[in-house]
Amino acid sequence: MRSLRASVYSICIVAIGGVTAAAPAYAQQCPGHPDALGTSRVLTLHPGELTHVGLMQYPQTLPLADKEVVLTFDDGPLPRYSNPILDILAAQCVKATYFLVGEMARTYPAVAKRIYASGHSIGTHSEDHPPHFQKLPIEKIREEIDDGIADVGAALGDPQELAPFFRIPGLARTDAIDAELAARSLVVFSSDTVADDWHRRIRPKDIIRLAMTRLQARGRGILLLHDIHPATVAALPELLKRLKEAGFHVVHVVPEEPKRILIAGP
């Protein structure tokens, strides 16, 4: 039973608050790609405040400067699309934050390991991304949170490699769900903007247009994408190029070290 698996899994998580800028990794440090977008700086989250981020749903977000963007990817891993996205990010020396689904990580652990080995932050996104997450019984919500953490941690081979970040499936938050995540000292990542890349018939050029228009309107922010769709793969190289041309800088969000070990579950 999956809930039993979660109950015995030690998960490395920590409450998040203040922020620190670590030594930046500039684009010129991207070997063989002098024109790469690169990662302009690392934003380290510390214990304390900032338990919920993303202006689409919460009154606060990450402390980003003008023209700074945090790239996030949901719903993977799925080798057919996750691997090309990792290749594209690597070519541009861009670091992102991933929110992996437990059953996907369990099915494709090699890709989960590759995401981590590539230097990206890895949070979780429930066990199997059920629709209408907010309508589930609270016991099922708890199981989805805990089993997703356990399975992604197991896929990585070391649960301490997990970031204590969680994105609610469908951004379907409620006060009760937020309370469950707070009890686990998880940072809830909503988003500041989206590119609608999950729409079935969306074209790559529309993903690029929506992402750029919305980011430029806000001036900065967290961008929500998915690494399980072919249109996202097709759009990403041009999107990164357009971000650089528009003067945007990528920020990589990481949790503070050392992390505090807690047991997954209420």
Image (cartoon, grey):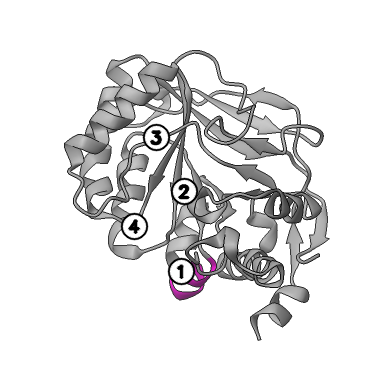
Region in magenta? 102-109
- Mark positioned earlier in the residue sequence (1 or 3): 3
- At 64% across and 80% down in the image, what residue appears? 2
Q: Where does label 3 land, which residue?
A: 93
Mark 2 and mark 1: Cα distance apart in space:
18 Å
Residue bearing the label numbered 4: 228
Mark with earlier residue (2, 3):
3
Name the residue beneath numbered marker 1: 104
Kind of residue at badge 1: Met
Q: For marks 2 and 1, give the one nearer the viewer.
A: 1
Q: Are marks 4 and 2 in contact (CB under 8 Å)?
A: no
Q: Which mark is residue 260?
A: none
Q: Which residue is mark 2?
A: 118
Image coordinates of residue 119 in percent, x first then y, are 51, 45
Q: Amino acid at mark 4?
A: Ile
Contact, mark 2 vs mark 3 (Cβ under 8 Å): no
